[in-house]
Amino acid sequence: MDKEEILYNVKDLIADHFEIDEALIKPEAKLVEDLDFDSIDAIELILQLEEKYDEKISADKLKSARTIQDVVDCLYELLRAREEEVIAK
């Protein structure tokens, strides 16, 4: 899965679950300042992403995410690591 696919999925998930206009969900959009996320929203986002990707996501991994692109990058690294583990087995 590439970053474009992850971005599409993240945008779709945020638009549907948080009822945010998809036009506002851009890679550079700041979660707190632009999308009005709070700590509960961040936890809910992690839970939704875990369900979507069937992958445990540590809150510490996404704690430093400030933008949509940060979330995409974090997910990309996590999914790449999972794929590498599968290939190594």
Image (cartoon, rainbow, N blue to C red):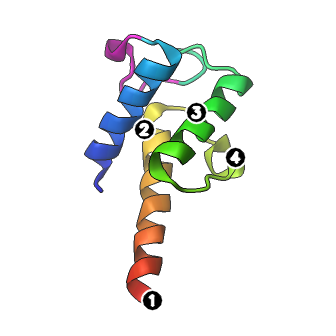
- Mark 1 or mark 2, which has the lower sequence index? 2
Q: Which x, y percent locates residue 60?
A: 71, 50
Residue 13 sits in which quadrant?
Answer: top left
Q: Nearer the viewer, residue 28 or 80?
A: 80
Q: Which residue in the structure is indicated by mark 4?
A: 59
Dot 4 crowding, Cα within 10 Å, few <14, some 14–19, many 20+: few
Q: Which residue in the structure is indicated by mark 3?
A: 45
CA gap between label 4 and label 1 equals 27 Å
Q: In what quadrant of the picture does the N terminus appear?
A: bottom left
Q: In what quadrant of the picture does the C terminus appear?
A: bottom left
- Residue at left 37%, top 28%? 11
Is 27 on the left or on the right of 52, as rendered?
A: left
Question: Which structural element holds mark 3?
Answer: helix
- Residue at left 28%, top 54%? 2
Amino acid at pointer 3: Leu
Question: Which structural element holds mark 1?
Answer: loop
Q: Inspect the magenta stretch and tell me whether residue 26 lies in it.
A: yes
Q: Inspect the magenta stretch and tell me whether residue 7 lies in it.
A: no
Q: Which mark is residue 89?
A: 1
